[in-house]
Amino acid sequence: MKNIPIILMALLSFMVLPAYAQDFSETAKIQYLIASVETLEGARFIRNGREYDTRAASNHLRLKLKKVGNKVRTAEDFIRLCASQSSMTGEPYLIKLADGSTVKSEIFFTDKLKTFATNKL
């Protein structure tokens, strides 16, 4: 009978651990996505018609993530709610790459997320 509380605690910890692991995994994915734009050499982030360097872009995404709070549970949520378009104007965010080509940030981040998943397999 003395071991029942210990066994119960052990069972509860096994139930809680997967939830924390998923949160950690999603947080790692989100941080990877932010870093992927922050480390783009020669790229510009276009928000509401203005160009920003990648450091300003990553700071903006972190701020937006903080403001959205617990609505972002997955990396996909982050892309949809923080990294795809302006919440003020609805205009899509764009990334101008070093070669001069432009891509919607939603596509850029979705592709980066696929790369993250592939590298983790």
Image: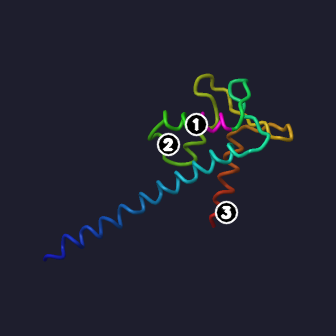
Say what amino acid the circle numbered 2 marks.
Val
**Residue 53's quadrant in the figure?**
top right
Q: Residue at x 46, y 60 (%)?
A: 21
Q: Residues within 10 Å of mark 1 (few under 14, many from 20)?
A: many
Quarter of the picture holding the N terminus: bottom left
Query: Is 1 included in the stretch rendered in magenta?
Result: no
Relative vertical location of residue 63 with respect to residue 21 in this rendering, above or below: above
Left or right, 30 with reference to 24 = right
Dot 2: element: loop
Quarter of the picture holding the C terminus: bottom right
Where residue 100 appears, as percent x and y from the top left, is 85, 37
Query: Is 58 included in the stretch rendered in magenta?
Result: yes
Q: CA distance from mark 1 to mark 3?
A: 24 Å
Left or right, 61 with reference to 40 = left
Q: Which residues are magenta?
A: 55-61
Quickly name the residue at label 2. Answer: 72
**Residue 40's quadrant in the figure?**
top right
Are the two marked residues, 1 and 2, in contact with CB atoms closer than 8 angstroms? Answer: yes
Are the two marked residues, 1 and 3, in contact with CB atoms closer than 8 angstroms? Answer: no
Q: Residues within 10 Å of mark 3 (few under 14, many from 20)?
A: few
Where residue 13 appears, as percent x and y from the top left, is 33, 65
Say what amino acid the circle numbered 1 marks.
Cys
Q: Earlier in the sequence, mark 2 or mark 3?
A: 2
Magenta part, dominant SS: helix
Dot 1: element: loop
Quickly name the residue at label 3. Answer: 119
Residue 82 marker: 1
